[in-house]
Amino acid sequence: MNTQRIARKRATERQPLFWAALAFAAGLAVGQHGWRPPTWWLAAFLVFADSAICFSRRRPRDAFLISLCGVFILGALIIQVRHPAHPSDSAILRFADGRQITLTGHVTAEGNIRAQGPDVRQRLDIETEQVESDEQSVPISSCIRLSLYEKSPKGEAEEPASGAAMHLFRYGERLRFATKLNPPRNYRNPGAFDYRGYLEENGIVALASADVAKVELLSGFSGSYGELWRSRIHDSIINKIHAVWPAEQAVLMDAMVIGEDAFINRHTRMDFQRSGTYHVLVVSGMNVTILALFVFYALRWLRVNDLLAAALTVGLVAGYALVTNVGPPVWRATLMLTVYLGARLLYREKSMLNAIGAAALALMVANPLVLFGASFQLTFLCVWLVAAVGIPILERTIQPISRGLRYIGIASFDFALPPKVVQFRLDLRMIAQRLERFLGKKIPLPAIATSARFCLGLCQLIMISAVMQVGLALPMAYYFHRATTLALPANLVVVPLTELLMPAAALAVGLSYVSVSLARIPAWIAGWAAVGIAGTVHRLGGLQLADARVPTPRLALILATILVLALSMVLVRRRPMAAVAGLAALCLSALFICLFPFSPQTRAGALEVTAIDVGQGDSLLVVSPQGRTMLVDAGGLPWWTHSELDIGEDVVSPYLWSRGFRRLDTLALTHAHADHIGGMPAVMASFRPRELWISSDLSEPELRPVLSKAHQLGVKVVQLRAGDTREFGGTSVRILAPDRSAFSGRQNDESLVMKLTYGNTSALLEGDAEKASELEIARKEPGADLLKVGHHGSATSTIPQLLAAVRPRFAVISVGARNSYHHPREEVLSRLENWNVATARTDLDGAITYYLDGKSVTTSVPDLH
């Protein structure tokens, strides 16, 4: 056994905490999904603990393996006996029934003023003190999220608001205001983001909005003075950033330096996500690490001893994490940095995996549920890939050569190096000697050494970036449905610029407290880096290649990829052929995730119609008996909501990805209203349909974004009118409306109405057709088993004449919970009940699926637990 193999074996043996962290995480995962009585887990733990003690002296390796089994059992036990967290009193939810109440409370988290069109908005987190209603006044301490708005005066609706006049409420200020509470609600579809769970993690139990002009500012302060000082420092740094940098650069500096991303628009976020560089946009572990290492090595350059430099660095980073208030990602990075510097002081630099394991174990013991968060998984997978795969590869390839560039002018240093490295040094000296004829004796060798260091450093960056991109393919596909095809070239530019930006920006902000003039030079350097980052991200993120989307990986693929990740860690430490095999397996797993066309989850031989929960809007998935797919409408939000939520990207697409769909054959747009058309461009970009069916006048301005995207992607636009028929994968599609007569100008009555027939079963999809259109439809033999109720259950639709002609057995209403239109109307529900129609609603039932097999109709609702 040679020296390198002995060293690698010893390094592996010095990683007990890493293996303990893996065992504990496995126990948490098993315990979360496989319940057993706690006494079983406890008895098993005692047995393994006793066995480990018995074997500890005679057979230490066996004792270690048995100990890991005990840690696994302990993880399963802890996750099952933990007390559920109740971060905030939910008693206030009994007032979330639509009635107006008056709340008294104080600000616990302040926001920023944002101008959105003609309106100005401000978001705050409030801890309530008193709740007043018509019946009672009760003291309740609950946390709510409050959205304040300020409307422009009449006659100025077209003018963009500035927000200068709105009062910015600060931490600890006490308020009194009238409002209506809304409980947080998720879109009830498989694959949907758990918005309610996200708010619960932040202690928020209800949502509210109020006109800022009607908010009464009370006297007194309520809260922590420590948090008050933190918020003041945070605001002060933001003010300095906006004083030093121009507005466009300041927005990026806010996000990357201090974690304030409120002013980053959706388009910029999407560019960072498409290019695989989103981790630099907000304060993350990488930003913290760059800043910390700069401080540590700057202190060492100033000849501060290791212990004091480490203590000052940890203290500074902890203060930075506190001021940014970003949350767990920064504190995880701080913990990992502390463990790493502590290990460095104990001369344990070779046990980087052990330091990672210690940090992970501490976090999971403190909060077992952190394991199941995307942020935790991405953070530790990134660090693990660098430590367990990237660094071992570099140690066997580039790093020995890079170390060989030290003291290149001292020939006696050659005797301490391997023969291949010595030969490399000799070659560089020979080249330098040739150049001495032209450049003199002092310049060539240092210049060649510097150039070689730069090239080798670039190679190391490329290697580490490549390992991270292929290793992160699984979580990127699972959580974000993205194959970051351009992440490698993007990060090769963005990461070095971030390494330049972070210390320069920190220095500029620090100097700005002394003199803004002193801050100009580091501010110019940081601004130049920010411009480079933004330009790179915009150019690469805007490419069509960057928008490669993938469905949710299946469980078997997830387990196989985890096995490949573990195997690659072992193989890269073995013989060269084994290391190459490990890297090849890692690359193939990434390609498999991104390119392998898994069959979507469908039912063969049946026509499927699924009403997707998109809130107050429409989106229907149709799957033919032969597997062809059509999406009818894609939901959307009206302009006056001033929301950056894209229903197509954030709601419809995740549902389709959760079903395993990569492509759609057809998109059908019933009419050009925002709640039907808003999500179309995003869905079209993600699923690249072959055809787009529409009924609307092509000159309508609302259609321009959709038609432009269709033209860009080469989607064929088909305009359909009443009387047209189409064959769709074994299903007959008959268009019942709108008429071929001139456009009426009322878009609801221009809705594309389709009757889908398979065998002896059929479905009638109405869009937002109202009375005039329904009267025409009733004359065209529209009989169907399933009716998609028109216009979300509005009283202007589902007239008795239509029900008499259709005679449906099932009906589905696509409608938003607690919508301001009071849909569905009671009279519509009564009509359906009188005709004995089994009616489902997306606001109550979520995404509901109907299967028409040619003889009968069956229903299915998703299991969202």
Image (cartoon, helix red, strand yellow):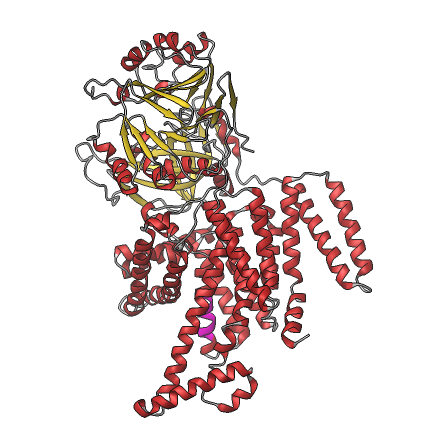
Residue nearest the observer in this picture, 497 or 289: 497
**Quick check: 450 above or below 48?**
below
Which quadrant of the rendered structure holds the C terminus?
top right
Magenta stretch holds residue 164: no
- Quadrant of residue 152 within the rendered picture: top left
**Quick check: 555 above or below 328?**
above
Magenta stretch holds residue 294: yes
Asked if residue 620 lies left or right of residue 543, the reply is right
Asked if residue 138 lies left or right of residue 566, the reply is left
- Quadrant of residue 710 within the rendered picture: top left
Asked if residue 351 lies left or right of residue 224, the reply is right
Q: Residue at x 56, y 48 (%)?
A: 370
Which residues make up the magenta segment? 292-299
The reply to whether residue 638 is in sight is: yes
**Quick check: 610 above or below 382?**
above
Figure disc tally:
0
Q: Which residue is drawn at 38% across and 90% down?
A: 433
